[in-house]
Image (cartoon, rainbow, N blue to C red):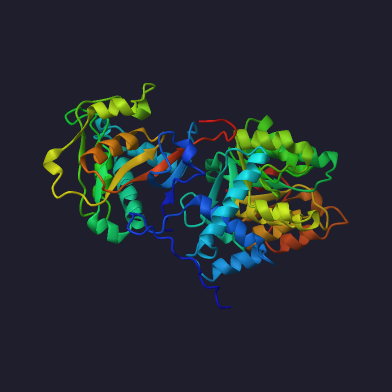
Amino acid sequence: MTVRFRKIDDQNRGHHSYLTADDDCLFLLEYTSGQDYSFSATNSLISNLKKKPSLASTGPYRYKLEAIDACGVALGEAIAPKWLAAGTLVPVPPSKARGDPEYDDRILKICCAIPGAVDVRELVVQTRSLPAAHESDQRPSIDDLLTVYRIDESKVAPAPRSIAIIDDVLTNGTHFRAMTTTLQHRFPGVPISGLFIARRVFQNPFESP
Amino acid sequence: MVPPARLFTARSDGDGPAVNPISPLRELGAYEALWLRNGATVKTIADRFAGDPTAMPSDFVEPSEADRRAREVLQKLKTAGVHRFGVRVNHAGDYPARLRDARHPIELLYYQGAWELTETRCVAVVGTRKPTDNAIKQTQRLVRALVERDFTVVSGLATGIDTAAHKAAIEAKGRTIAVIGTPLGVYYPPENRELQDLIANDFLLISQVPVLRYANQAVPQNKLFFPERNITMSALTDATIIVEAGETSGTLTQARAALHQGRKLLILNALFERADLTWPATFEARGAVRVRDPDDIWKALG
């Protein structure tokens, strides 16, 4: 069954504190924070995606590769072919800088696995490693990210006409905000969307995030 | 029947990256608007989508009306104390494909709690609102055994067997899902308020009942939502177990739905031995499992 993107709208934006009504963010799946059900398909997909590169020689690593392919296909079915032909897909850079043994370019690989993806560009690079947000109590702030995000000037031509930032999980929107700020500064006026495999929601409906 | 024409299919986001992106809020409003139309029933709404399988509620409702209805729903739910909830809508991710096995599939559901519970192995335990003491004890034993085998226990939060099933699952530290016949934030029976809030908080509460239509019509019409939720409960689960039910019980709606949807239907043996009941034998002849021994349950559930 082909799944269409859902929008972040007024009903669901509260789960993502750094998003505003001006942000165009879309997602395919939802998963509930704090739940670790191995039987949740989305949970399992995300956990497979995040298998560490240091496990590359182990058998279960193939689940990561399968998850990357599945995400690419699912995104491909939900992205408009017309947009794909002219737009630029920009992966959120890995939390570890290139050269770090745990450098994990899964988001770039997902972009490359999207059938029909023409323009996948790592326009934003990270100059040094930060703890991965999903592994750390000290999640990087927007300012932390802005300090280490740089535009890769070797990749800016031709100038993008429309940008989709790609990431696996939307939590507070920290990375999206920092990416958007960095890209808007370099490419003013270019429309930017965020496309996510999944967004995190809260189980307890009576508590604020 | 000629499918009703889509009147408002201007959903594609112009030059944006997504194919017909779904706004859950607008779909919710559009779905509520469809329910407010004269003569709308589960069947008439399902027929509309059966005739146009890729349609969404917003294809049939003017955007301004959908958005207005959505705001009304949010306001009403907020007034009822429901500050956070989610929806599941056909064609978006996380909508359970098994709902399409219903004769009149539901396009949109409201929920509170952890939706992931629907992905566990779910068994419905249902029955009469006026159970015997023995039936309550049987329910408790059955539910404990289901929890031990890691099944999620699903029921309808009604008085009687349903309440006993939910409570026994929670007491046994298992998982439970309530599929209710009222909108979120409405409690029936009122004495189950605490239990409903607990399930919404710690487990999963599901409602297919349209908030505005429910508020706009009288109790007798709203009673129809109860048997309709039994059909959804069956569709969401692998099997339905009936502990005790009379000859005209609403539970039998779920029994019929289970067989129609290709789900297992299990009926406890004591019901076959009651001279006043003919339905157990009728359903057995149509494929239901007669549970003489607990092993009959585990064999049927596989």
Most extreme residue toward the top is: A138
Q: Quadrant of residue A25?
A: top left
Viewer-proximal residue, A28 or A153? A153
Side of B38 where A176 appears, left or right: left
Residue B135 image offset from top left, x and y in percent: 80, 42
Q: Please name the residue shown 49% across and 44% down the image.
A: A10
Residue B247 in the image: state x and y as whole percent. 83, 57
Q: Is residue B108 visible?
A: no
Q: Does residue A136 sit above or below B26 in this rendering? A: above
Rendering coords of residue B220 (x, y %): 80, 57
Number of numbered discs visible in the structure rendering: 0
Q: In the drawing, does residue B268 fall left or right of residue A200? A: right
In the image, B301 versus A37, the foreground residue is A37
From the viewer's perspective, tell me whether residue A31 is left or right of residue B72: left
Residue B298, horizontal then vertical, whole percent: 62, 45
What residue do we see at 63% from left, 30% from top? Answer: B173
In this orientation, does residue A103 appear?
yes
**In front here: A62 or A20?**
A20
Q: What residue do we see at 19% from left, 28% from top?
A: A127
Instruction: Specify the farthest residue to the right.
Output: B276
Vertical side of B162 occupied by B10: above or below: below
- Image point (24%, 34%), residue name: A57
Which quarter of the image is occupied by the N terminus of chain B?
bottom right
Residue, far left: A154
